[in-house]
Image: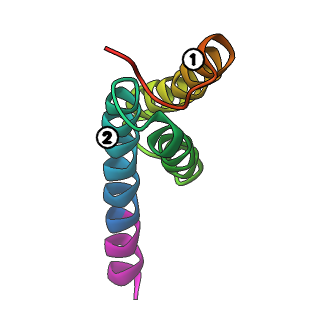
Amino acid sequence: MELTATARTRTGTRDADGMAVAAFVLGLLGLLVMNLILGPIAIVLAALALWRGTARRGRALLGLGLGVADLVVLATLVTSDGVLAWNF
């Protein structure tokens, strides 16, 4: 039975590592497009990865910071333009 618990722990850590990387990528992408959607998703994935004890703690923290930055950029754009979209 101990083998099953160890395999489950490795799988959980690998899932948490994937969440940390996904949070980082979505947070970074959210700075460019769809920050209203990708920002909160990045925050949730980063929080879950940190809660599950990811080995990629730095990536999870970067994903969390970028998710928050997405929402700050969104708030800045809405208050300055009154629009929920980027203008090029």
Q: Which mark is residue 77?
A: 1
Coordinates of residue 55 in the picture (x, y in percent): 38, 40
Amino acid under disc 1? Leu
**Of the numbered discs in the image, which one, if any, rests on residue 60?**
none
- Secondary structure under tag 1 reads helix
Q: Which label sits on residue 21?
A: 2
Asked if residue 33 lies in the magenta stretch, the reply is no
Structural crowding at the residue carrying mark 1, measured as other residues with C-alpha within 10 Å and reported as few (<14), some (14–19) or many (≥20): some
Horizontal side of residue 32 vs 39, given as left or right:
left
Disc 1 and disc 2: Cα gap in Å? 27 Å
Which mark is in front, 1 or 2?
1
Tell me the quarter of the image containing the C terminus.
Answer: top left
**Extreme residue toward the bottom, this view:** 1
Callout 2 secondary element: helix
The relative height of residue 72 versus residue 13 in the rendered view (above or below) is above
What residue type is disc 2 on?
Val
Q: Is residue 6 above or below residue 68?
A: below
